[in-house]
Image: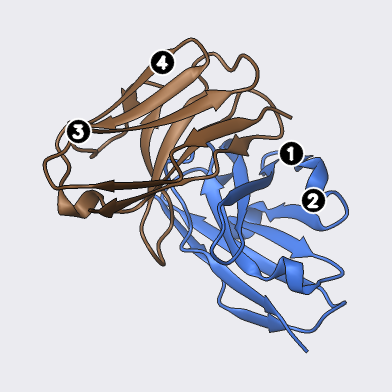
Amino acid sequence: QVQLQQSGTELVKPASSVKISCTVSGYTFSSNYMHWIRQQPGNGLEWIGWIYPGNGNTKYNQKFDGKATLTADQSSSTAYMQLNSLTSEDSAVYFCAREAFAYWGQGTLVTVSS
Amino acid sequence: DIQMTQSPSSLPASLGDRVTITCRASQDIGNYLRWFQQKPGKSPRLMIYGATNLAAGVPSRFSGSRSGSDYSLTISSLESEDMADYYCLQSKESPFTFGSGTKLEIK
């Protein structure tokens, strides 16, 4: 069965970076787009962008240009999202979701605090 | 960017009620519209895709419809397990955009 397993909770300091992961199983990783979505506390959902693991092509929401960097490792069937220059505004739950949004990871909570 | 205007933001309803949530798209999105259900502390669950198609495993009391640029999610007879937040998503054009959400709660 299709599974997307995300890395655990992160507590990080302002101005630092964090890299969260999404490891998949049950399907061909390289053949499906992977989306990343943000949900700030008590707020709605925002689409960050997608990556196509087969060739590394990416598409970003302009709002997250320079903030998020999406990469993928086919050998480990893992998608990554690095978030840079973190501020309190980046505190949120981040989800990965497979191409058609039918399968989601469990979410990774990132808290930015000194 | 395509704006998805979702209403209402909050919907108090009773068990057994028929309820409808609506998203209006600021530009043509065809049928590139999905509906999600999200319960507290959980990941969103796909309910409807292609504006009108029921996702796998979703109860038949859920349905999706379209009238022009208005897209609706209807629950024909509300059950307690349906109390959750609901979001629409357009995937016609990047950036993909979500509606602001509807909190469905017991009256």
Residue A70 in the image: x percent, y percent?
75, 53
User: Which is more foreground, mark 3 or mark 2?
Assistant: 3
Query: Disc 1 marks which residue?
Result: A55
Query: Disc 2 marks which residue?
Result: A64
Residue A18 in the image: x percent, y percent?
75, 73
**Residue B64 appears left or right of B75:** right
User: Which is more foreground, mark 4 or mark 3?
Assistant: 3
Q: Chain of mark 3?
A: B
Amino acid type, residue under disc 4 in the picture: Arg
Q: Residue furthest bottom?
A: A114
Same chain for the residues at labels 3 and 1, yes or no? no
SS type, badge 2:
helix
How is colour applied across the structure in the image?
A: by chain
**Residue B105, quarter of the rendered image:** bottom left
B51 lies above or below A15: above
Q: Chain of mark 1?
A: A
**Residue A44 appears left or right of B107:** right
Q: CA distance from mark 4 to mark 1?
A: 36 Å
Query: Disc 3 marks which residue?
Result: B18
What hue does chain B carry in this figure?
A: brown
Q: Chain of mark 2?
A: A
Q: CA distance from mark 3 to mark 2?
A: 39 Å
